[in-house]
Amino acid sequence: MANNLTSNPYYVDTAATLWTDTNKSILLMQWVDDNADIAAGDELAMTINGVSVDCKTNFHDTAASIDLNNVMIWQIGPFAQGFPIKSLVVDTISHGVLHIWLQ
């Protein structure tokens, strides 16, 4: 599936500039393993208001495979009043999808 920046929540599964120089308030952001394909070392890298945020997976499991289908990997929020973000760029998303709920 491709990025969907017209819905609420936004659906982001590939690197993209989501918005710049526009004030938006987020209620919640979640990186979700929607296809059970996130592995150790996968990364979500974003630039939020000019600051780099890097999220990497680090699984400690001895099983041959880990079924993480529809498991939330990383989250920011929820915020009752919305968290203001003026610029949001997804630089890298190895696997999974980023859901962003806007106020």
Image (cartoon, rainbow, N blue to C red):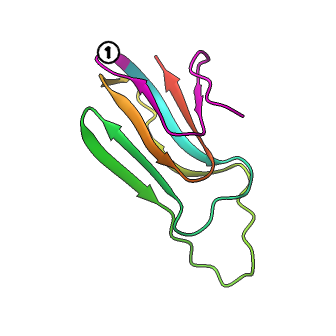
Up-down: is 43 above or below 100?
below
Q: Main secondary structure of the magenta part?
A: loop
Q: Quadrant of the N terminus?
A: top right
Answer whether residue 6 is magenta in the image: yes
Q: Could you say where residue 73 lies in the image, as x and y percent from the top left?
A: 56, 54
| Quadrant position of residue 79 | top left
Q: Look at label 1 and name its amino acid.
A: Asn
Image-based side of 101 in relation to 61, left or right: left
Answer whether residue 57 is magenta in the image: no
Judged from the image, the secondary structure of the residue bearing numbered disc 1 is loop
Residue at the spot x=53%, y=41% of the render?
30
| Quadrant position of residue 40 | bottom right
Magenta stretch in the rendered image: 1-24
Q: Could you say where residue 64 lies in the image, as x and y percent from the top left?
A: 75, 81
Up-down: is 44 above or below 28?
below
Residue 81 visible in the snapshot = no
Image-based side of 33 in relation to 48, left or right: right
Residue at the spot x=51%, y=64% of the render?
57
**Front residue of 80 and 32:** 32
- The 10 Å Cα crowd at callout 1, few under 14, some 14 to 19, many 20 or more, is few
Residue at the spot x=56%, y=21% of the render?
5
Up-down: is 59 above or below 46?
below
Q: Could you say where residue 13 lies in the image, as x and y percent from the top left?
A: 60, 39
Q: Could you say where residue 62 lies in the image, as x and y percent from the top left?
A: 66, 85
Residue at the spot x=56%, y=53% of the render?
94
Residue placed under numbered mark 1 in the picture: 23
